[in-house]
Amino acid sequence: MPIIYRYLTGEILKFFLILLVIVTSIFISVDYLGDLEIFVDSGVSLLRALFFVLLKVPFMTTLLLPVAFILAVVIVLSLMNKNNEIIILKSSGTSVYYLLKPVVLLGILAAILLFAVSEMVVPATMEMANRIERNEIRKKRAVTTNNMNIWIKGNRLITHIEYYYPENMSVFGITRNFFDKKFSLIKRVDAKKGVFKNGKWLLQDIMEQNLVPQTGQYLVTFFEEREEELDFLPDDLKSVIKKSVEMSFPELYEYIKKVEAEGYDATMYRVDLYAKTAFPFMCVIMSIAGLGIATCGNKPKGLPLSIGCGLGAVFLYWVFHSFCLSLGYGEALLPFLAAWSANLVFLFVGALLLLNVE
C-alpha cells in the first residue's frame, strides 16, 4: 500500500473514532438528563434508566456514524489542503482522483459496519428498549402482539386486531368481546376495517352479536358503517407493534410476505426494507462528497467552511431521504425509488464536486 494511502487511512480512522465517541457521549448525556424527570416520575431507578438509554446507543450510532465519517474525511483532507499537501500532489502529477480509492474503500467498510450493526445489534436492543419504555416507563395497558395480531385487554373486554397500518391509522379484522362479571360472553362486535378520523374510530362492515338473556341466543345485527368508542388510540397501537427497526432484513422480508399474503397493504414496510440497504450506502456517497468538499475552497477559511459544508451535506441528505421515504409511504413513489432516490441524487452531486476540483 502506498505511503499516502496508509497516511490517509490512519488519519481518517483516528478522527472517525474520536468524533464517533464524542457524538455518542453527547447523545447519552442529553438523552439521559433530558428524560430524567420522566424516569423519576415513573419510579424507574436511575441505573435502570441508564441501561434503557444505553440500549438505544447502537441505533443512534447507526444514525451518527455517517456524520462522523464525512467529518473525519473533510477534516483530514482539509488539513492536507491547508498545508498545501494537495497542491504538492497535483504538482507532482497526481490527480485528486488518486485519493479517491482509499477514501471510497473506507466508505465501503463503514457501510458494511453500519449494515452489520443495523442487522445484528439494533433489532435486539431496540426491541428491549421499547419494551422497557412501554411497560416500565410509560406503563401502557396490557397488550400483547405477535407481529400482525394485537390483543388488548380492557375492563371485561378483550379486543383483537389482525393488522394495524400506522401510515393511515387504519385497523383491519377487529373483534371485540364483552364479558359480564362471571366472564360470560354477552356481546361481540366484528368489523372488517376501522379508520381513525377527527379523534374518533369509524368502523366499517360491522356485525354485532348481543346475548338475549331470555333465550340464551345471540341477536345478530349488521351495520355498514358507524362510529365506535374504542378504548385505545393509534399511538397506543403504534407503540406495541413490532417496528421495522426491530426486525432484521430477513425478518422484515418474511413479515412483508405474510402481510401481503393476508391481502393487506405492506407498502410502508417494503419502503423500510429497501431503506435498510440504501441508508448504509450513504457512507460511500459521503466519502465522495467529502473529498470534493475538502479539496476545493479558500485555504485560510478552508477547515471551518469545509466542516460546515460537510454537516450541511449530511443534513440535506437526511431531509431529502426522509422526504422521499414519506413519498414512498404515501405511494407517490415506488418503494425502491423512495429508498434510493437520495443516494442517486447525492452521488451525482458528489461527482460534480470532484469534477469541479479537477
Image: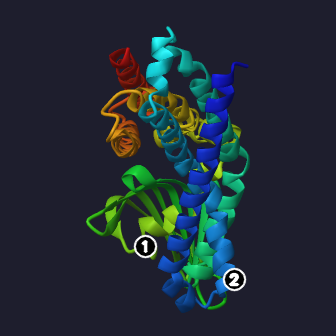
**Farthest left residue?**
198
Which label lies toward us, 2 or 1?
A: 2
Foreground of the two, 353 or 163: 353
- Which residue type does callout 1 highlight? Leu
Mark 1 closeness class: few <14, some 14–19, many ≥20 residues within 10 Å: few
Residue holding disc 2: 47
- Which residue type does callout 2 highlight? Leu
Foreground of the two, 35 or 20: 20
Residue holding disc 1: 230
Task: Report which quarter residue 204 is drawn in.
Answer: bottom left
Across and down, in percent, residue 314 comes to 41, 42
Q: Does residue 234 appear left or right of residue 49 in this picture?
A: left
Q: Relative to residue 26, is residue 94 depicted above or below?
A: above
Q: Residue at x 66, y 89 (%)?
A: 182
Q: Does residue 92 appear left or right of residue 2 in this picture?
A: left
Mark 2 closeness class: few <14, some 14–19, many ≥20 residues within 10 Å: few
Foreground of the two, 266 or 51: 51
Q: Is residue 167 visible?
A: yes
Tally of numbered tags: 2
Foreground of the two, 111 or 105: 105
